[in-house]
């Protein structure tokens, strides 16, 4: 059993960003996946601009030096996220959720993040880290960690 959740990404099944009728659930996509299988892939460094997302020139090269970074998803794996039906949809959530986003996150801009927050029921807190970019834990470790610790301690007091 869990007491709550802290979420930084907003690509949550059932949210406005991944509606139940998304194209990955279509017959046409199923045909593409059968033909291409794991050869059909998403190259992450073509999808994201790491220098912009992380807020400095050279971020992509720094990530490339990390042997544990993921650089591609096969589309079957990506599609599984888009097809996932959670046991409890966010529209029926009853557990505390803390959504966190950087004020200047180009991947999940505030209006996009706000749409997901607004679609979530239950006790929901929305934390916007001032001047934050995309990777809060990586680039704003102290501020982000302090907020998460305070939030978790607040749950324990209830």
Image (cartoon, rainbow, N blue to C red):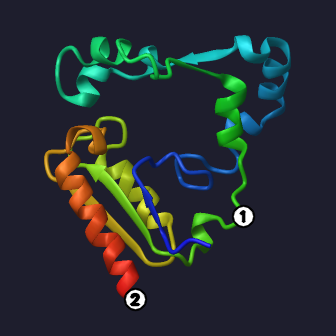
Q: Is residue 127 left or right of residue 117?
A: left
Residue lying at 50% horizontally and 22% vertically, measured from the top left: 70
Circle number at residue 87: 1
* Image mark count: 2
Q: Nearer the viewer, residue 10 or 141?
A: 141
Residue lying at 33% horizontally and 51% vertically, measured from the top left: 111
Q: Position of residue 83 (x, y in %)?
A: 72, 43
Give how far apart the Cα atoms at labels 1 and 2 are.
25 Å
Q: Label 1: few (<14), some or many (≥20) within 10 Å?
A: few
The N terminus: image quadrant? bottom right
Q: Label 2: few (<14), some or many (≥20) within 10 Å?
A: few
Q: Nearer the viewer, residue 129 or 69?
A: 69
The C terminus: image quadrant? bottom left
Mark 1 vs 2, N-terminal side: 1
Q: Is residue 48 left or right of residue 122?
A: left
Q: Position of residue 133 (x, y in %)?
A: 23, 39
Q: Position of residue 123 (x, y in %)?
A: 44, 78
Q: Quadrant of residue 97?
A: bottom left
Q: Say if 29 sits above or below 8 in the image.
A: above
Q: Which residue is mark 2?
A: 158
> What residue occupies the far left of the structure in this picture?
131
Q: Quadrant of residue 152?
A: bottom left
Q: Quadrant of residue 57?
A: top left
Disc 1 secondary structure class: loop
Q: Is residue 42 left or right of residue 37?
A: left
Residue lying at 42% horizontally and 63% vertically, measured from the top left: 117
């Amino acid at each position: 059993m869990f007491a709550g959740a802290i979420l930084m990404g907003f690509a949550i099944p059932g949210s406005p960003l991944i509606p139940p009728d998304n194209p990955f659930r279509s017959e046409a996509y199923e045909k593409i996946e059968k033909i291409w299988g794991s050869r059909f892939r998403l190259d992450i460094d073509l999808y994201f601009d790491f220098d912009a997302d992380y807020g400095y020139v050279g971020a992509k090269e720094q990530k490339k030096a990390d042997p544990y970074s993921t650089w591609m998803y096969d589309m079957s794996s990506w599609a599984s996220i888009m097809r996932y039906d959670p046991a409890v949809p966010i529209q029926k959530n009853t557990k505390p959720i803390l959504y966190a986003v950087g004020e200047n996150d180009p991947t999940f801009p505030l209006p996009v993040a706000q749409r997901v927050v607004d679609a979530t029921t239950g006790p929901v807190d929305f934390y916007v880290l001032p001047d934050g970019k995309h990777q809060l834990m990586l680039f704003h470790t102290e501020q982000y960690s302090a907020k998460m610790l305070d939030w978790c301690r607040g749950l324990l007091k209830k």
